[in-house]
Image: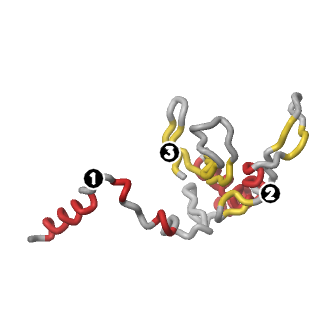
Amino acid sequence: MGLVDYLKHAWNLFTSYPDRRDIRSYTEYFGSISSSRPDRARLTYSNERSIISSIFTRLCVDISTIDIKHVRTDDKKRYLEDMDSGLNNCLTLEANIDQAARQFRIDVAMTLCDRGVVAIVPVDTSINPQQSGGFDILTLRVGCIVNWYPRHVRVSV
């Protein structure tokens, strides 16, 4: 048997399972894997050593100092109180397992400056959002919008 036959058999090994739900990837158990450093943003608008990159980075850090809160308002849209909710916890304390609220806001600002649009996606919720109209958001991630539809968007998180 030649190399081509070995590759065909190796490929059939992975594609011939009758139920693909039994196949689990390593990322399910160990988390996601990245080939780039997560603490360094790779921006597409310019070379990393240019002056514009420094300006955008400083701008994003300044934007992240603005507090974003989940609040209750009265009927005239005036502030009453901060809500005690998972969303407010994500926006003020910890957005997800590896980002504090400030780093999350920096990530939102960087993505917005880099791509022009951003999606803030609830990843973990208290109950399934498709089963109920009311749910509490437990963690958030920044997503990039990859496809636009008339009433929906496809997001890469």
Q: Residues within 10 Å of mark 2 (few under 14, many from 20)?
A: few
Give the structural element (helix, strand or loop) at label 1: loop
- Residue 156 appears anywhere in the view: yes
**Residue 95, above or below 72:** below
The three-letter amino acid code for the residue at tag 2 is Thr
Give the structural element (helix, strand or loop) at label 3: strand
In the image, residue 48 lies at what x, y percent?
A: 59, 65
**How many numbered badges does the structure rendering display?**
3
Left or right, 77 with reference to 98: right
Residue sitting at 64 percent across and 51 percent down? 113
In the image, residue 146 lies at what x, y percent?
A: 50, 45
Q: Which residue is mark 3?
A: 146
Residue sitting at 67 percent across and 42 percent down? 135
- Nearer the viewer's eye, disc 2 or disc 1? 1
- Nearer the viewer's eye, disc 3 or disc 1? 1
Q: Which residue is mark 1?
A: 18
The three-letter amino acid code for the residue at tag 3 is Val
Give the structural element (helix, strand or loop) at label 2: loop
Left or right, 75 with reference to 94: right
Mark carried by residue 65: 2
The three-letter amino acid code for the residue at tag 1 is Pro
In the image, residue 70 lies at what x, y percent?
A: 79, 45
Q: Between 23 and 55, which is closer to the camera in this rendering?
A: 23
Q: Residues within 10 Å of mark 3 (few under 14, many from 20)?
A: few
Mark carried by residue 34: none
Q: Earlier in the sequence, mark 2 or mark 3?
A: 2
Q: Earlier in the sequence, mark 2 or mark 1?
A: 1
Q: Residues within 10 Å of mark 1 (few under 14, many from 20)?
A: few
Q: Are marks 3 and 1 in contact (CB under 8 Å)?
A: no
Q: Are marks 2 and 3 in contact (CB under 8 Å)?
A: no
Distance of label 2 from label 3 (alpha carbons): 28 Å
